[in-house]
Structures are given as structure tokens and as C-alpha cells.
Image (tube, rainbow, N blue to C red):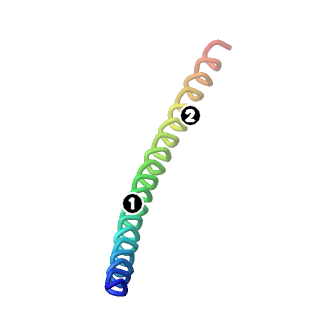
Amino acid sequence: MVKLQLAASVNLMKLMKKQMQEKMGFYNNALQSFMTKDQDEANLLLQTNKKTVVAIEGKRSRTSAAST
């Protein structure tokens, strides 16, 4: 009887370990997806900011040239 309970406990532990590994894989994939999305959004924002800075610098240089 004790051996049967021990075997059942071992099988249950193996099943729980497998389920935890599957969940961990799912969460790792989800986290990686969010991180990639955040990185893409950050890169897009950086590009937009660079374009804005270039546009402002262009306006400043035209304004400076007009006033001299």
C-alpha cells in the first residue's frame, strides 16, 4: 500500500513538473513577445524624435540665415 502511494506521489510530482515547465515556456514566450513589441515601439519613438530634431534644426538654420 505504501509503495502504491509513493508511486502515485512520484507520478503526480512528474505531472506537476511537466505542467510547470509548460507554463514557464508559455510565460517566457509571452514575455519575449512583449519585450520585442516594447523594443519596436521604443525604436519607432526614437526615429520619430530624431526626425523632429532634424526638422527643428532645419527651421532654426533657416531662421538664422534669414536674420543675418
Neighbour tally class for label 1: few under 14, some 14-19, many 20 plus, Cα within 10 Å: few
62 lies above or below 34: above
Name the kind of residue labelled 1 in the image. Answer: Tyr
Q: Label 2: which residue?
A: 54
| Residue drawn where x is 60% and y is 16% of the image | 66
Neighbour tally class for label 2: few under 14, some 14-19, many 20 plus, Cα within 10 Å: few
Q: Secondary structure at mark 1?
A: helix
Q: Are marks 1 and 2 in contact (CB under 8 Å)?
A: no
Horizontal side of 54 relative to 30 (left or right) equals right
Q: Position of residue 53 (x, y in %)?
A: 56, 31
| Residue drawn where x is 38% and y is 67% of the image | 20
Q: Which mark is residue 27?
A: 1
Please identify the residue farthest to the top as the structure is shown.
67
51 lies above or below 9: above
Q: Quadrant of the N terminus?
A: bottom left
32 lies above or below 25: above
Q: Which mark is residue 62?
A: none
Q: Earlier in the sequence, mark 1 or mark 2?
A: 1
- The image quadrant that residue 16 belongs to is bottom left
